Image (cartoon, rainbow, N blue to C red):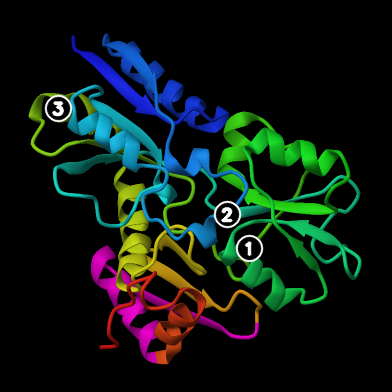
Amino acid sequence: MARLRIGSRGSQLALWQANHISEILRERGHQIELEIIKTTGDKILDVALAKVGTKGMFTKEIEEALAEGRVDLAVHSLKDLPTELPAGFELVAITARVNPRDVLLSVNYASLKGLPCGARVGTSSLRRQAQLKVGRPDLDIQPLRGNVDTRVRKLEGGEYDAIILAAAGLMRLGKTQFAKQYLAEEFMCPAAGQGALGIEIRAGDRETRKHLEFLNDSAARATTSCERALLKKLGGGCQVPIGAFAEMKDGLLHLIGVVARPDGSEILREKQTGTDPIALGEKVGETLLRRGAAQILEDVYGAAQVPVPAQP
């Protein structure tokens, strides 16, 4: 069988993900090596990611290692992977998805509704911040950076009354002891691709592709491709105030798209159904742009920082 070298970030969650894929590949007889690569996003720890404004901040250095032949595949959280890969790379597989929703963690409070007025809630996601401010404008939203362990430790130490994290990461690391409420997508629309892993290889690497194609999950590919098509249509990356959630029901894809101002003063929600993932994502994106999403995104980042497409 093949000798395959995996590139991964060094965070606890990234290593869990890389080791998870490693175990599956070893069970099929492959020899696996793991190379830890520090990315731009890992180096910037004292600034909110939304203020950095760099697409690919968690993937660029790993792709460089791929291009140079130092690794054969990269394992990413799909929500960190830009919607348009640079030339020379391909997304060979999207793994089966775990819970894509966000979750409220708290030591003392059982739900978002139960948080007192002025409660300190930690998140550095503009998407989460905006939707929280729509539903609970009385909360004190505070920045929260660091890996999952660090964030949970800050909560346990009393720095926050509650924090919001992706359910998938907590479940994978077994850190659910303070998970109190899994937030419905109608209230807190998740990030595009949340809960799935993306396996990236060099474009045209047929030998590696044939060893990895079995990892692709058709349902996860359909729903996340739909969400990522919406994100791409809006010109956004993983740090913009955009939510996208697709699921398959009765043979139809149901997609919710959200664009919001970080202060919660304006939020656009759009829900449509369809059968073609890309077409549905683009259609919902076009609708949101017509309804004012382009102006919201320009106001948040400025046209020079986030390229917002012209309205159709």
Q: Where's residue 65, x and y in %?
A: 26, 29
Instruction: Work out whether residue 23 or residue 249 is closer to the camera in this orientation and state it.
Output: 23
Q: Quadrant of residue 189?
A: bottom right
Q: Where's residue 252, x and y in %?
A: 35, 66
**If you read the primary sequence from the N terminus, does the residue marked by circle 3 or circle 1 appear first?**
1
- Identified at 40% across, 16% down, the residue is 23
The answer to whether residue 224 is above or below residue 266 is: above
Instruction: Work out whether residue 38 or residue 167 is closer to the camera in this orientation and state it.
Output: 38
Check residue 210 in the rendering and tell me which mark sits there, or answer none.
3
**Would residue 295 be counted in the magenta stretch?**
no
Check residue 184 in the rendering and tell me which mark sits there, or answer none.
1
* Element type where label 2 sits in the image: loop
The answer to whether residue 210 is above or below residue 51 is: above
Q: Are marks 1 and 2 in contact (CB under 8 Å)?
A: yes
Q: What residue type is disc 3 on?
A: Lys
Q: Which residues are magenta?
A: 265-290
